[in-house]
Amino acid sequence: MYETIMLKKDGRLAYLVLNRPDSMNAMNAKMMRELADCFETMKNDHTVDVLIIHGVGRAFSAGGDIKEMVDPDNPMDIDSVMEDVSRLATALYTLPQVSIAAIHGASAGLAFSMALACDRVVAEESSKLAMNFIGIGLIPDGGGHFFMKERVGVPKAKQMIWAGQVLKAHDALSKGLIEDVTAEGRALEHAEKYAHEVLASPVAAMRKSKEILHNLKLGELEQVLAGEAAGQSAMRRTADHLEGIQAFVGKRKPSFTGK
């Protein structure tokens, strides 16, 4: 059914697997669309109570596929992509299931936005977590502004977004960005342990509390996503973004001019 992701079910527990291991699960346009489609489908699946999101290979996900961004033969349609990114974030935030991100390796950019949207984030101690859009002259998308602000507040969210710092799991935990740190190779196991605790709980009550709390903020998320879509489209046309992309591909330090 999907080419870049897999959805597997085990009774009331489901696994959404990011499946582009040769690209460190970098999110190309197809993956973004398939994730949005999958989350929208899961909203109507009343047989599943818990969803674990994880990646195969060396990483959870390296974030947006920069190679696709710079492909001259098949240029990325940023407006179409942002529609799918907004669908992805809205559907994930409004999932009735309890969602758990199990992170190993890198979780960067859009992938980190997606992880922060989950109800619980588990990361291995060697993980590298980054809201690092600023490094290529872009702004967070996928609701990144909203989800960071929800977890750490506006002043800290601004500082983290502007710094684009790569955090180790214990740093992210101390800042309130994630809930759990595990030893290397144990994130999925820890996520499954928590999932089974949820399944042994009055999960209908948990889901109702989630619905009440998230419905309070849904309008705000939608406003953020609209701002991110317009802002990202504008940032894609800046000289700083072009310089950031070229520097990334050329493995050199960018020289930004603020334009």
Image: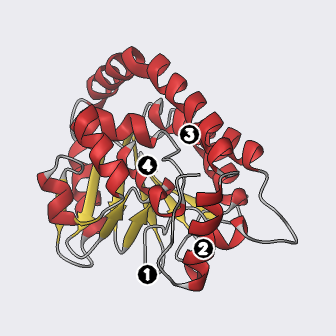
Q: Which of 188 and 46 is in front in this view?
A: 188
Q: Residues within 10 Å of mark 4 (few under 14, many from 20)?
A: many
Name the element at disc 3: helix
Residue nearest the viewer, comparing 164 with 102: 164
SS at circle 2: loop
Vertical order, 215 against 153 (above or below)? above
Q: Where is residue 73 in the image (x, y as percent from the top left)?
A: 88, 72
Instruction: Residue under label 3, please give it.
Output: 42
Nearer the viewer's eye, disc 4 or disc 3? 4
| Residue 11 in view, yes or no | no
Q: State left or right for residue 91 relative to residue 114.
A: right
Earlier sequence position, callout 1 versus callout 2: 2
Look at mark 2 in the image and give the residue it sits on.
20
Q: Under tag 1, what secondary structure?
A: loop
In the drawing, does residue 188 fall left or right of residue 190? right
Give neighbour class at mark 3: few <14, some 14-19, many 20+ (Cα, 10 Å). many
| Viewer-side label of 2, 3 | 2
As measured in the structure, the alpha-carbon distance from the residue carrying label 2 to the one carrying label 4 is 18 Å
Q: Nearer the viewer, residue 184 or 84?
A: 84
Tell me the distance, in whole angstroms, between the alpha carbons under discs 1 and 4: 19 Å
The residue where tag 1 is placed is: 58
- At which x and y percent is residue 50? 38, 44
Which mark, residue 113?
Answer: 4
Quadrant in the picture for residue 245:
bottom right
Q: In the rendering, at what x and y percent does residue 59 appear? A: 43, 74
Which tag is nearer the camera, tag 1 or tag 4? 4
Q: Which amino acid does label 1 sit on?
A: Arg
Q: How far apart are marks 3 and 1 (CA)?
A: 26 Å
Q: Nearer the viewer, mark 3 or mark 1?
A: 1
> Could you tell me which residue is drawn at 46 percent across and 56 percent down?
134
